[in-house]
């Protein structure tokens, strides 16, 4: 079962992230650049919440062209 939920809002040059625990309490919020540094920051903040990545589910928006 997942203990942490991470939602990501993506734009061309940056992304915003919010991490919640299972009770819906905000654990972190992050705005980062869409590059390796930004993804490293995201990895660091998720790792600070848990040592077991299998307890984290990540969701992000999906755009499709019709």
Image (cartoon, helix red, strand yellow):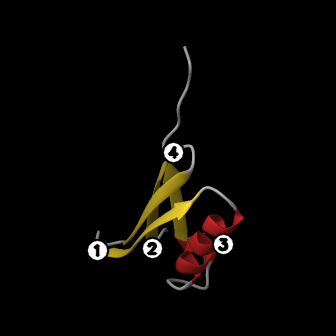
Q: Is residue 32 left or right of residue 21?
A: right
Residue 3, which numbered label? 2
* Proximity of marks 3 and 1: CB atoms separated by less than 8 Å: no
Q: Position of residue 24 (x, y in %)?
A: 29, 69
Q: Which of 16 and 63 is in front in this view?
A: 16
Per the image, the residue denoted by label 1 is: 25
* Front label number (3 vs 1): 3
Residue 8, which numbered label? none
Q: Where is residue 18 in the image (x, y as percent from the top left)?
A: 40, 65
Work out how far the residue at label 4 is from the one at label 1, CA to CA, in angstroms. 25 Å
**Mark 4 or 1 closer to N-term?**
4
* Front label number (2 vs 1): 1
Per the image, the residue denoted by label 4 is: 11
Q: Which of 40 and 13 is in front in this view?
A: 13
Q: What element carries label 1?
A: loop
Callout 2 crowding tier (Cα within 10 Å): few <14, some 14–19, many ≥20: some
**Mark 2 or 1 closer to N-term?**
2
Callout 1 crowding tier (Cα within 10 Å): few <14, some 14–19, many ≥20: few
- Residue at x 45% of width, y 62% of height: 17
């Amino acid at each position: 079962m997942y203990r942490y939920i991470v939602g990501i809002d993506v734009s061309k040059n940056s992304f915003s992230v919010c991490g919640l625990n299972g009770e819906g309490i905000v654990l972190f919020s992050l705005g980062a650049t869409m590059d390796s540094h930004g993804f490293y920051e995201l990895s660091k903040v998720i790792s600070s919440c848990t040592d077991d990545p299998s307890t984290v589910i990540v969701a992000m928006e999906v755009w499709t062209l019709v």
